[in-house]
Amino acid sequence: MSWDVAIIGGGVVGTAIARELAGYQLRCVLLEAAEDIGTGTTKANTAILHTGFDATPGTMESRLVARGSALLRDYAEQAGIAVERTGALLVAWTAEQAGSLDAIAEKSRRNGYTGIRSVSVAEVYQREPHLGPGAAGGLCIPGEWVIDPWSVPLAYATEAVRAGVELRLGTRVSGVSALPGGDGFELSAGPGAALVRCRFAVNAAGLASDEVDRMFGGGGFTIRPRKGELIVYDKLARPLLSSIILPVPTARTKGVVVAPTVFGNVLLGPTAEDVLDRSDRSTSAAGLSALRAAGRRILPGLDREEVTATYAGLRAATEHSDYQLGAFGRYVRVAGIRSTGLTASLGIAEHVAGLLGEAGLPLKPRPGSQGEGIGQGEGAKPPRMPYLGEAGTRPCQDAARIAADPAYGQIACHCERVTRGEIRDALASDIPPASLDGLRRRTRAMNGRCQAFYCGAAVSAQFSRPGSDAAVERDGR
């Protein structure tokens, strides 16, 4: 079979593009090297829904973050994805940093975000009384929110699959050949794998995007992975802050953030370390020690709280300061997205569809998409995702839901209050998890303070035997 478009990469950007193109009368295939979507850069981030206030004005990143932010806020509401409108407080800790606040506010306005405002030292502590001593001023950014980062790519991919996009997991593109007459490409995916013929191709391969780009004859950038280590604190730390606490950014990094999460925890990080190994997601004693020291200065009470987990993510940074996004004939490159990919994803997808149209791909809307692709929010409704946040009602708190299906009253993971019914639903979903880690991202099971010590065996048993009612009944007694 020949496809109109092959999208390479199943992270938040690749799935957003697949969802956007599903709004048109096209045959599309989404190729992901891993056995699940969202397993690379996407799964390990600070889970902040940005405004783009601190982007470089005039860049593609600035424009697409602003557009994507507006689209994702609406999409999350429609899909039932957990979002908390925490706002952010950018805190200056030195006189020099305080002197840069007006310039940051002016940059924000040039980026189109005008909600930013200066706050006095007294207001800084009024808003966040548990901050450490020595704050010299601040900026309030009410539009910075926190979001469930795992459900976003899953919602995009689910919507795309339901609209006819074929999802091929475990498919790593290993070679590209141009078809005769410039009529597209033939993609190989290793020994024994079927060739994929497509008229147009989109490279959204994240950390592997430069390798894929060279297969298409490119080579204008190199991925330089930047590792960020993070610490997740127990839910008992959540009363220490009400908003995202941002540092004054530097030319190289946005710095260490202290942020609430929609799951009820507190997140501290990330570090910023350039690494050579694209699979290096290890944490280090030095990195975690540096984070603890930064957290102690910013929010001293964190030092008395329990750590639930530590993890590290890799950002797909390049030698360039802006996104590497453009069309080269029938090939579209989407690279160098770095830490703003979650927020910008729908804006990027909309832009990519436009580039494909300009390159000659007929963009004829599917019936019901009302003319401009589902990425405009006017087509097929997003799937309703399981709500994973702490602020709303979970299944175990819903008496009517439990009465209709007792499995929602049978707790499998007590730390995160995940029920047998939720695990069963995830295993029977359009894109079921291929591993316990995938199940964790779909339900929060095993993600709490015990880190699967108590619930791991029971959750694993249900994962291994998803159709077994006996497993539910036995452990639900």
Image (cartoon, helix red, strand yellow):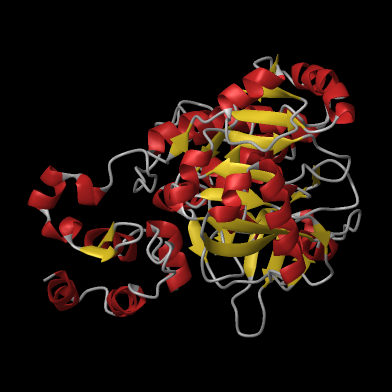
Query: In the rendering, at what x and y percent does residue 240 appear?
Result: 52, 40
Q: Quadrant of residue 175?
A: bottom right
Note whether residue 86 is visible: yes
Q: Is residue 265 above or below residue 64?
A: below
Q: Is residue 362 above or below residue 452?
A: above
Residue at 18 percent of width and 74 percent of height = 475
Query: In the rendering, at what x and y percent does residue 340 appear?
Result: 69, 42
Give whichever of 448, 407 is nearer the camera.
448
Note whether residue 349 is visible: no
Give the left or right position of residue 378, taking residue 315 as reference. Answer: left
Q: Is residue 270 above or below residue 122?
A: below
Residue at 57 percent of width and 46 percent of height = 301
Q: Quadrant of residue 346?
A: top right
Query: In the rendering, at what x and y percent does residue 8 appear?
Result: 65, 59
Residue at the outermost left position: 403
Give the left or right position of residue 44, taking residue 183 as reference. Answer: left
Query: In the rendering, at what x and y percent does residue 134 appear?
Result: 75, 33
Q: Is residue 318 above or below residue 449?
A: above
Residue at 44 percent of width and 50 percent of height = 236
Give whichever of 204, 109 is nearer the camera.
109
Give the left or right position of residue 310, taking residue 206 as reference. Answer: left
Query: Could you tell me how many numbered marks the image carries?
Result: 0
Residue at the outermost bottom position: 191
Classify the position of the C terminus by image quarter.
bottom left
Classify the position of the N terminus by image quarter.
bottom right
Residue at 34 percent of width and 74 percent of height = 454
Give whichever of 357, 316 is nearer the camera.
316
Q: Quadrant of residue 314?
A: bottom right
Give whichever of 109, 5 is nearer the camera.
109
